[in-house]
């Protein structure tokens, strides 16, 4: 069971590796990538339809004859950086479509040849061959374009098999080199020749001379010569006439200055148009440089420079010297007087350069990564042909002095002053730029908003990114020709207007401090076609809504939308793209919000005022308050009355205008009849000293029923309304059926005021007794009314009735006339 599990795990791992290493390319070609897999031999299970096979950076030491037999579709094979020692080309005899074969960086010392007819690229460089591994079969590889070789010696006969081939590139690595037969390289027919010489040996300059006579493009790496310049082998005049190289690159050069001068003399007087020297170290004894015998050489060079040559461009990159003393002015003079179009001295720690003595042919100068200062080319009238000047990463400080430097460069179109120490202040005076200057790079300096007062009037493109600009001042000189302005990585808090830049088409204001960009930007800048405003700390709020609408109306003018436009504030929205941020119109329109709030307030006031006015709500609130206060006083002042006992059969509520009927009909018929009914009437039962409201509440609560005599007079009485309210409140608070309505006279609905809505509700929902006009029905009316109020009262209150009558009669009537 364990072995089965192991096999299953191994199969899964193998399939995973196979899936990751074998994948179709964009051209539907299958690629098998085994690079860096610590392989010691060629894998056996390579898919048979593989087109591209990468076996580089492994430990493969042997190539068997049958490992590639099944790969009939193989076109590209990379076996570089392995440990192969012997090479038999017959291992690829069945790979008829093979076009690219890389066996560089191995330990191959011998090779057995086989025709590979379709091969275009063969690289055998950086191996251990003693002689060049050029087989006779190479001579019929007519598709061959790139040939990489390595050897310890080169003989003239080594190239006899490939001399007739039209090669594009020949790459030679000459490690542990011991022998070169002169003129051997001239047998080659190649457009480009690249030679990497041994790093620890003196260079054989015959390789340089023959290489220049062999190819159009020559690159040589590792030119080191420690012998005296007196032993330096100068080329023959006959050889100089055969030079056909136009592009020469020398990389990693360590020579005496006098040797460099002799090489330069050779190149200057040849067909070379572009000379590039990288990683140059020049040295030499101090004594020799101070001797007079050196002077004739320098003077001959100066004379040669004045005559001109085929050279158009000289490039020196990363120059260092080991001289403790030399006359820098002489050196600078040689460069400044060169009759060429392009001069580049990059990363050379150069502190100064002289102005040419006579009108110069320079059109392009690149002095980047040096130590140049504001004194460069001041009052220089001889650079009238200069079009491009690059002074990136130097030590310039004054922008006004830079402008004066360019004022006499009548043809200058482009100036790069980036990554310097430039500052500008109004105290420096007016800037004077070349009228022809169209593009200016002032990025990565220490400039503030004062720089806008020192820009060329006819400038088309200005790069001011990574400075200390906080705003674009108003009232600056108008730059009508300005089309592109880069203000990225500054301290701007808003989008600048275009009052001074009427022709602006492209504006970059990324990585500033803009929270809410102005929404009227495109209105003030109608000519802008592209706005780059991303990567700012946007505050997603109502103010940003207008800018979002601006984006929708801009027609795609916002570059980088929406990825570069992300909320920074508030924190809960940080990281949200602006396109996903939305707020309602009501939340952001202050006027609309105030109008809406005002309308809602008016509606609320109207809704509240209507019932208050129509139903007299304040009156009911006041009555409720009085009832509550009365109950509270009764609770605190008369604890013995907290549990109220019934003292009357009924409380009578009526209008004073109906008092005759009450006194002559109602009271006599109820009290004089059977059952000894006790009625509560305000004239005899209200207690002096208490308020009318308290007396009403006490009488209602001490009565079994409340009789309301309804008539048109009743609805006109305020106190009747009180009594009805308190009785109705008892009806609901005690859940009792204590109301008796007597309709003395019909009441038209229009007579009842709106605030008597309870009376309307009671008359609509409850049965009431109607006083009959026929006398014959009076007996039945009284019988029904007596039956409704008849109840046995507690004995103590019945015995005290006479005393109560005396007290009530003697009291002053406290109830107001209804």
Image (tube, grey):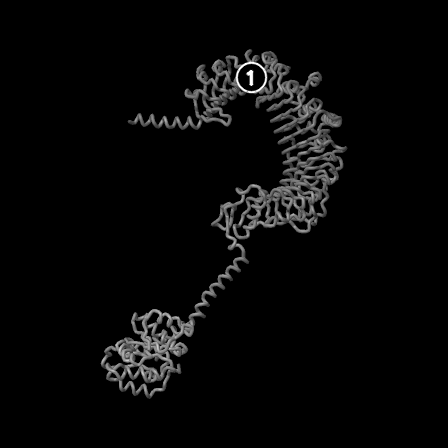
Depth check, front residue: 751 or 128: 751
Q: Position of residue 486 (x, y in %)?
A: 62, 43
| In the displayed structure image, the side of residue 172 where residue 617 appears, left or right | left
Q: Position of residue 314 (x, y in %)?
A: 67, 29
Depth check, front residue: 195 or 20: 20
Depth check, front residue: 629 or 747: 747
Q: Classify mark 1: residues with Cα within 10 Å, few (<14), some (14-19) or many (20+).
A: many
Check disc 1 and report the residue beneath it: 151
Q: Quadrant of residue 761?
A: bottom left
One can see residue 182 in this view: no
Q: Position of residue 272 (x, y in %)?
A: 68, 23
Q: Residue at x 53, y 19 (%)?
A: 99
Q: Residue at x 52, y 52 (%)?
A: 541
Q: Is residue 467 above or below residue 631?
A: above
One can see residue 775 in this view: yes
- Please tell me whether mark 1 sits on a helix, a strand or a loop: loop
Q: Quadrant of residue 712?
A: bottom left
Quarter of the figure that contains the C terminus: bottom left
Q: Position of residue 194 (x, y in %)?
A: 60, 22
- The extreme right residue here reads 358
Q: Quadrant of residue 421?
A: top right
Quarter of the figure that contains the N terminus: top left
């Amino acid at each position: 069971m364990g072995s089965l599990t192991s096999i299953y795990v191994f199969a899964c791992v193998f399939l995973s590796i196979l899936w990751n290493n074998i994948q179709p390319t964009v051209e539907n070609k299958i690629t098998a990538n085994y690079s860096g897999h610590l392989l010691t031999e060629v894998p056996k299970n390579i898919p048979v339809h593989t087109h591209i096979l990468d076996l580089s950076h492994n430990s493969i030491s042997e190539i068997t004859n049958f490992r590639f037999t099944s790969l009939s579709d193989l076109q590209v094979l990379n076996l570089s950086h392995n440990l192969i020692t012997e090479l038999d080309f017959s291992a690829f005899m069945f790979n008829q479509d093979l076009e690219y074969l890389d066996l560089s960086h191995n330990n191959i010392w011998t090779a057995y040849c086989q025709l590979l007819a379709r091969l275009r690229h063969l690289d055998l460089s950086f191996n251990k061959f003693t002689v060049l591994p050029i087989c006779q079969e190479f001579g019929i590889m007519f598709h061959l374009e790139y040939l990489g070789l390595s050897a310890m010696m080169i003989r003239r006969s080594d190239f006899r098999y490939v001399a007739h081939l039209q090669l594009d590139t020949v790459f030679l690595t000459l490690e542990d080199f011991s022998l070169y037969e002169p003129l051997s390289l001239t047998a080659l027919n190649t457009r480009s020749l690249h030679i990497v010489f041994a790093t620890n040996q003196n260079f054989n300059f015959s390789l340089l001379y023959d290489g220049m006579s062999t190819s159009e493009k020559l690159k040589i790496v590792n030119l080191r010569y420690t012998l005296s310049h007196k032993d330096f082998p100068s080329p023959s005049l006959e050889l100089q006439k055969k030079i056909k190289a136009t592009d020469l690159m020398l990389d990693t050069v360590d020579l005496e200055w006098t040797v460099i001068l002799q090489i330069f003399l050779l190149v200057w007087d040849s067909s070379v148009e572009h000379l590039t020297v990288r990683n140059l170290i020049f040295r030499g004894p101090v004594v020799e440089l101070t001797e007079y015998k050196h002077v004739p050489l320098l003077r001959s060079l100066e004379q040669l420079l004045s005559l001109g040559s085929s050279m158009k461009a000289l490039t020196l990159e990363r120059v260092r010297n080991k001289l403790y003393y030399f006359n820098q002015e002489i050196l600078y003079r040689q460069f400044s007087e060169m009759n060429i179009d392009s001069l580049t001295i990059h990363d050379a720690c150069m502190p100064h350069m002289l102005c040419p003595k006579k009108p110069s042919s320079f059109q392009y100068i690149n002095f980047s990564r040096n130590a140049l200062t504001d004194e460069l080319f001041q009052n220089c009238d001889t650079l009238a042909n200069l079009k491009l000047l690059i002074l990136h990463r130097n030590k310039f400080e004054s922008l006004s002095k830079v402008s004066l430097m360019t004022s006499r460069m009548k043809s200058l179109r482009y100036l790069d002053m980036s990554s310097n120490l430039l500052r500008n202040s109004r105290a420096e005076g007016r800037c004077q730029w070349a009228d022809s200057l169209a593009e200016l790079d002032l990025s990565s300096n220490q400039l503030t908003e004062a720089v806008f007062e020192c820009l060329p009037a006819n400038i088309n493109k200005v790069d001011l990114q990574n400075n200390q600009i906080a705003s674009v001042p108003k009232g600056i000189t108008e730059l009508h020709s300005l089309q592109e302005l880069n203000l990225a990585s500054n301290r701007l808090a808003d989008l600048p207007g275009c009052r001074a830049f009427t022709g602006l088409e492209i504006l970059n204001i990324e990585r500033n401090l803009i929270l809410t960009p102005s929404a009227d930007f495109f209105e003030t800048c109608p000519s802008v076609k592209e706005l780059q405003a991303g990567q700012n700390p946007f505050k997603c709020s109502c103010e940003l809504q207008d800018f979002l609408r601006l984006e929708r109306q801009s027609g795609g003018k916002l570059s980088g939308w929406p990825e570069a436009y992300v909320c920074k504030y508030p924190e809960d929205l940080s990281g949200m793209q602006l396109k996903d941020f939305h707020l309602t119109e009501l939340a952001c329109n202050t006027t609309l919000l105030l109008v809406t709030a005002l309308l809602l307030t008016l509606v609320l006031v109207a809704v509240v005022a209507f019932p208050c006015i129509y139903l007299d709500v304040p009156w009911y609130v006041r009555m409720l308050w009085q009832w509550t206060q009365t109950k509270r006083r009764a609770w605190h002042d008369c604890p013995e009355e907290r549990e109220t006992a019934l003292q009357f059969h009924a409380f009578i509520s009526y209008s004073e205008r109906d008092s005759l009927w009450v006194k002559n009909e109602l009271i006599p018929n109820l009290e004089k009849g059977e059952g000894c009914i006790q009625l509560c009437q305000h004239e005899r039962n209200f207690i002096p000293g208490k308020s009318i409201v308290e007396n009403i509440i006490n009488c209602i609560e001490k009565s079994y029923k409340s009789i309301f005599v309804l008539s048109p007079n009743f609805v006109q009485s305020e106190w009747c309304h009180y009594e009805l309210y308190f009785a109705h409140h008892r009806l609901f608070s005690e859940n009792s059926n204590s109301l008796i309505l007597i309709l003395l006279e019909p009441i038209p609905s229009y007579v009842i005021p709106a605030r008597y809505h309870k009376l309307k509700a009671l008359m609509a929902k409850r049965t009431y007794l109607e006083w009959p006009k026929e006398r014959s029905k009076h007996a039945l009316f009284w019988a029904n009314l007596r039956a409704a109020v008849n109840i046995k009262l507690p004995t103590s209150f019945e015995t005290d009735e006479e005393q109560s009558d005396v007290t009530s009669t003697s009291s002053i009537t406290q109830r107001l006339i209804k």
